[in-house]
Image: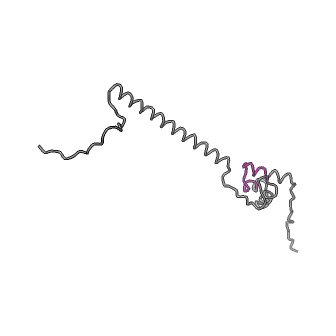
Amino acid sequence: MKTTIRVIATRRRFTDDFKREIVSQFEKGSMNTLQLSRHYSISQQSIYNWIYKFSTFNELGARIVEMKESSTSKLKEMEERIKELERAVGQKQIKIDYLEKMIDIAKTDLHIDIKKNYGTPQSGGSGKSEKK
């Protein structure tokens, strides 16, 4: 006689407090739906259903779009980029100040006017040279 073993499907029921905790973790950006699904062994569809039901940001008829990268990591990247650009601007400003000081020194000590003088007429070009 052949015996068959059949697994009885169990259906888990979750409390509203647990569902709200999952939704709050999603809203904080600490975990995305895939991570929550794997961590708690819950289907992503169930998590999305809970988000639509319990989310404080959810409006009726609005679709929730999950970003691949959390907003906190994007914010950190943008802050790092801002610091990098501020550093570059600071270096350029130091260079400009240095060059302006060199121009002033050339004018006062060497009597060389390097800055463009807007009052002088334009030259006519090199013109034709005479052969000797």
In the picture, residue 52 is in which quadrant?
A: bottom right
Q: Quadrant of the C terminus?
A: top left
Task: Name the one closer to the observer, 18 or 122.
Answer: 122
In the image, residue 123 sits, relative to residue 63, either above or below, namely above
126 displayed left or right of 81: left
Q: How many marks?
A: 0
Residue at 34% in and 37% down: 119
Dominant secondary structure of the residues highlighted in magenta in the image: helix
Q: Is residue 62 left or right of residue 127?
A: right
Q: For this rendering, which residue is in front, 111 or 82? A: 111
Which coloring applies here? Answer: one colour
| Residue 96 occupies quadrant | top left
The region drawn magenta spans 22-36
29 part of magenta stretch: yes
Q: Which one is nearer the viewer's eye here, 26 or 112?
A: 112
**Is the residue 32 above or below the residue 81 in the image?**
below
Q: Position of residue 25 (x, y in %)?
A: 77, 50
Left or right: 116 in relation to 89: left
Identify the residue at image location x=32%, y=30%: 112
Q: From this viewpoint, which residue is outermost toward the bottom?
A: 1
Queried whether the magenta region covers residue 32, the answer comes back as: yes
Image spot of residue 70 (x, y percent) = 68, 50
Quarter location, residue 15: bottom right
Task: Tell me the quarter of the image containing the N terminus.
Answer: bottom right
